[in-house]
Amino acid sequence: MSTGRGVWADVIDDDWNDWRWQQRHRIDGLEMLESVIDVTASEREAIRECKAWFRMAITPYYALLMDPTDPDCPIRRQAVPHLDECLTYPGMSDDPLAEEAHSPVDGVVHRYPDRVLLYVSHNCPVYCRHCTRKRKVGDPSSTPAGQRLDAAIRYIEQNDKIHDVLISGGDPLTLSNQVLGRLLERLGRIPHLDLIRIGTRNPVTLPQRIDEELCAVLRTSRSLYVHTHFNHPKECTPEAGRALDMLADAGCVLGNQMVLLKGVNTEPAVVVELNRWLLRHRCRPYYILHCDAAPGVAHFRTTLDDGRRVIKALRGHVSGLAVPQYVVDLSGGGGKVPVVPDYLIAEGPQEVVFRNYQGRVHGLTQPQ
Ligand code: SF4
């Protein structure tokens, strides 16, 4: 039991540290939320408005990271509905990356020649307010089950140009260990696959899920990469650090995909702190993703300059390993393109001129 757990002060440690208990006690309604934070009138209205189209769920663990009195808390912005989610804007799309148009069979998105996304779950411990897949996530009918999942895997088996599978959702770690183990085993038998990736936010929102039993399953998979989704240093808790350490010890190669979100992580110092913590836990900052043009994210959207400012603050000032690529995933399924600050000033046949991270100008002689 712990007094630091507010409304859950009486919960014994064994329950609190059990991911099943955390899942069962998720906050999914106003009344419960009000026992944890001071819900504002506008948040109350937003919860009512958003209920029909994108559900709310917050694990007790993640809820305790929220500032109970500050509606602008970066954790709260990611987890509690906001009235601005009702705003529309030019370019907004239910499926901004045209995943449905690039889906040859149910559950597979095949956008690049050599890799596919395999959609295996509609569940997540916390429903992130900035989610790109709101059209599917949280909707039980969106997940291919049984025979349809079988057909999706067969598609991968029969296409020897596919070398990389990203298991995604929803959150694949909401699958049972048994189901996940069978999936990894089947994918592991496909000779043309070089690597298998799992995209998961469990280390952030439900780190208790990363336990010995799960790691025993992951350890059996070959070339397993795990992409996490930490967005703010408030998420960098001892529990989350332990989860990353366990995944790395189980042989997973870890990378973080941060989504650039207004009011959460557009301040460079925030990202510096986050990325240094990630590296301490063997998780490489992989991408900063520009927020996709999904519904409900008008208040999260940033300019490209916000992203370039963050990269500028990282490059040269922290280890190169802490500098991710800032990318825009082009609407309509155009794929990811990197956006970089302007280091190249001029390019002639004799010399190229750069500005370095300190603002100093340096030349590079071209080969003649
Ligand atoms: S964990 Fe990922 S898929 Fe689930 S709600 Fe958050 S962003 Fe969406």
Image: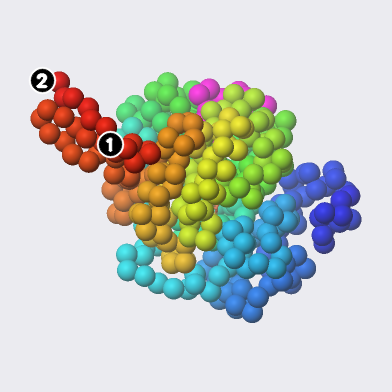
Q: Report the residue at 58% width, 62% height from top.
A: 77
State if disc 1 and disc 2 touch (CB < 8 Å).
no
Mark 2 sits on what residue?
Answer: 368
Q: Position of residue 337 (x, y in %)?
A: 31, 44
Q: Position of residue 176 (x, y in %)?
A: 65, 40
Q: Report the residue at 22% width, 35% height from top.
A: 353
Vertical position of residue 284 compared to residue 306: above or below:
above
Residue 152 falls left or right of residue 282: left
Assess disc 1: are there few (<14), some (14-19) or many (≥20) residues with their C-alpha within 10 Å of its C-alpha. few
Distance, label 2 to label 1, CA atoms, is: 22 Å
Mark 2 or mark 1, which has the lower sequence index?
1
**Residue 127 shows up from this direction:** yes
Near-viewer residue (133 or 335): 335
Quadrant (top left/top right/bottom left/bottom right) for the C terminus: top left
Mark 1 sits on what residue?
Answer: 361
Vertical position of residue 321 compared to residue 50: above or below:
above
**First to last magenta residue range:** 216-226
Which one is in front in this view, the residue at disc 2 or the one at disc 1? 1
| Residue at disc 2, secondary structure | loop
Residue 234 falls left or right of residue 24: left
| Residue at disc 1, secondary structure | strand
